[in-house]
Image: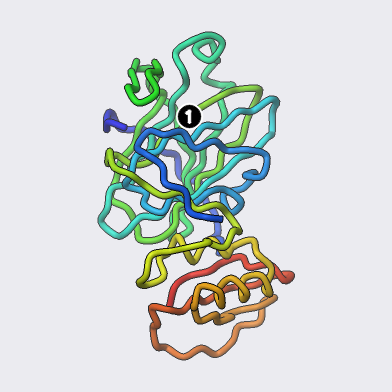
Amino acid sequence: MKLGARMVLTPVITTALLMQPQTAYAHQPVDLGLKNITADQGPILADGTVSFAIRANFTKANQTRGFRAVLKSSELLNFEYLIVDRAPENKYAMSKLPIATITYPSGKQVVVKLNERSKFFEPYSSTNYLYLGRFSETAEAGIYKISIKSKSAAKITVAIGQQEIRGQVLPAATCPISRAAGDISVGEAATLVGMSKSAGLECATKLNWQFRVGAEDDQQFALTKDYRLDRVTVTIKNNLITQAIPG
């Protein structure tokens, strides 16, 4: 979506957390459902510079939804928070809207502060929106995790990216059925998060990836320092993969 005014972000102290790919067009909605209650259980936007509109529908307070977006160093992190400009959405009190939190690849965490109410017509879906906040800055390299928590029943849209080109959405904990030849991407590796150790190994074997366990249940393993473009290194806790990175 088109870049606009700056959104204010409030820092929060935090610790670092360690199917088939679907093609989506710019502004094509990506719906967050009941299976996407955390960022690690949410879809992965393989290129966070591509414009996507992510929709979340909350029916009561304290519900959560999440997704992830991959960015490279020096690319632009562009984030927008919107609601549809029609009742009941445009009648929401700002204080009752869901809280959006962005966790950076470095582990830094910020809570989005809503500070505007600007009209915007989105031509892809022919929908009138209200911008409630916008923000852009130079990105860190890696996976950004966006978590949203409701204060009451509400429907909102958040947008990532600014390029009006085709993009790819990778489902969480789902082995890609097919992939282009070449190096393992950060987003592809992250599809292993949420799988069991055996399922992750099976997926990696199917895709001709080398599979390496870097840590398991707080035990760190000695690793070679070579960086292999066809290898994924995983962290495992309670038999579930909690982190997966190329190399």
Q: Quadrant of the N terminus?
A: top left
**Residue at 52% across, 61% down:** 176
Asked if residue 46 lies left or right of residue 195, the reply is left
Asked if residue 191 lies left or right of residue 216, the reply is left
Question: Circle 1 — which element?
Answer: strand
Asked if one can make out residue 109 in the rendered structure from this viewpoint, the answer is no
Asked if one can make out residue 158 in the rendered structure from this viewpoint, the answer is yes
User: Which quarter of the picture shows residue 123?
Assistant: top left
Amino acid at dot 1: Thr
Residue tagged 1: 157
Most foreground residue, 127 or 65: 127
**Residue at 67% across, 39% down:** 34
Percent from the top left, x then y, of residue 3?
27, 33
Percent from the top left, x then y, of residue 229?
38, 78
Percent from the top left, x then y, of residue 56?
56, 32
Would you place residue 80 above or below residue 105 in this image? above
**Residue at 56% across, 24% down:** 155
| Residue most extreme to the front | 178
User: Which quarter of the picture shows residue 148?
Assistant: top right
**Residue at 48% across, 53% down:** 21
Most foreground residue, 3 or 125: 125
Would you place residue 49 above or below residue 140 in this image? above
Would you place residue 201 above or below residue 29 in this image? below
Percent from the top left, x then y, of residue 25?
37, 39
| Residue most extreme to the right | 238
